[in-house]
Amino acid sequence: MKRITVAKGDGIGPEIMDATLSIIKAAGAQIEIDEVEVGEKVYLAGNTAGIAKESWDIIRRNKIFLKAPITTPQGGGYKSLNVTTRKFLGLYANIRPCVSLHPFVKTKHPEMDIVIVRENEEDLYAGIEHQQTDEVVQCLKLISRPGCEKIIRYAFEYAKQYGRKKVTCFTKDNIMKQTDGLFHQVFDEIAKEYPTIENEHWIIDIGAAKMADTPEVFDVIVMPNLYGDVLSDVAAQIAGSVGLAGSANIGEECAMFEAIHGSAPRRAGQNLANPSGLLQGAIQMLNHIGQTEVAEKVQNAWLKTIEDGIHTYDIFKEGVSKQKVGTKEFAEAVISNLGQKPSQFKAVSYANGSALNLPKYQRKAPKLKELLGVDLFVHWNGTSADELAEKVQQINTSEVQISMITNRGIKVWPDGFSETFCTDHWRCRFKPLEGKSLDKTQIIQLLGAAHEKGIDVVKTENLYAFDGKPAFSLGQGQ
């Protein structure tokens, strides 16, 4: 018997959670439930996180969290509970299977059967943003080696355990050579450890186009956070419906399972909602806690219900569907099919489907780190890079001098183009002269001199080499 935490959520959440629990319990799920309140009521009671400390204690104790969709009130100050939960509990892997249910659910891709494995904690979703000038704001894209290694290894282990043949990596490392470049580099390193599994890399734009057009050529796709968020919804939709997709969020200690759709408050309390998305999340949960026979029984019964034409309003189609049913009636139909297998869909087998046991990340020996220069980001309202260069050259020293100015990543000095449009946010790169070295005291001196000259430095970024390899971007056009 496994004790789990359940949150019924908002909108259609309570209805689809009751339906889901009735199905898995009827199938023999060995679970005990602690229910917690999260979402809109908690937000509106004055808790901007949408969850009470006592609820966190229960979730952390039980380790397994089955959550229905919630509503985050509009307006400032309310934090996304999904993002918070993933980060606080270290749920680094988001797993979204996207499978065609042709011909019973309309899709242009009848052979589609892919799994999106999305990194869940970092990338642009670290949420580190700043306004630095009147015209420019920044969002920091953080990609870590531990984050890359954990998610990519999970993708290969998932493929190995579920009999998948290929793992594909999507990045944009032709542009973001440091961040996406690291993700691609780690993918190539880990792929070598799995010689029986095919691997490939696609640039995200053409890869996304290919997935939308010919998804059957892919199997498991692993991506950084933002790309995975966007493309997992695209994949679910082109498979048939976002409303049918479930999601697993896996960490080293805890896991959360959910539908990927929202709380649909306009459909609440009408016995209309399709519980399939949350049920798919619950099936992933059952596999994760080792109750694979129950998971298999539920999935096969659900597939049979779909091919029997017993459909909720969202997928009902005249001439294909046989009976339009509500939430409760759909759950009852699935329960009546427990122990049976589909005849047109391929029946599932989860014999090897229990939780993956991945090794914990081992930190590598540190590399030799050498300071090569510094970028001073300057707020200046002028438009002439040459004029700014004259101003900034006043803080040159006998050992450290400005070498380049960029604006939005484009080199504008020296040898800039007059046609280049510039904002009020300038990157001024300082490097030591040939034969000289740089230390942080010199950077402090540069900042002091800039202050004295009325140069508004809004940010600095040190430029390093690791084991002799420069680890920073150049200006475009250099």
Image: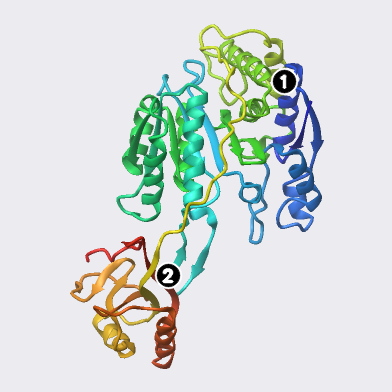
Q: Quadrant of the N terminus?
A: top right
- Quadrant for residue 452, please give it: bottom left
Q: Give left or right: position of 321 versus 440.
A: right
Q: Give left or right: position of 302 versus 231.
A: right
- Residue ID at (77%, 58%): 46
Q: Quadrant of the C terminus?
A: bottom left
* Residue that carries the numbered disc 1 in the rendered image: 23
Q: Give left or right: position of 157 versus 463.
A: right
The spot of residue 93 in percent (x, y) is: 55, 40
Q: Is residue 429 visible?
A: yes
* Residue that carries the numbered disc 2 in the rendered image: 136
Amino acid beneath label 2: Val
Amino acid beneath label 1: Ile
Q: Is residue 238 above or below residue 147?
A: above
Of the numbered discs 1 and 2, the one sitting upstream in the chain is 1
- Residue ID at (54%, 58%): 127
Marks counted in the figure total 2
Looking at this view, is 436 or 55 the one in front? 436
Looking at this view, is 79 or 33 the one in front? 33
How far apart marks 1 and 2 lie (CA) works out to 52 Å
SS of the residue at dot 1?
Answer: helix
User: What colour scheme has been applied to the protein in the rendered image?
Assistant: rainbow
- Residue ID at (68%, 22%): 291
Are discs 1 and 2 less than 8 Å apart at CB?
no
- Residue ID at (80%, 32%): 33
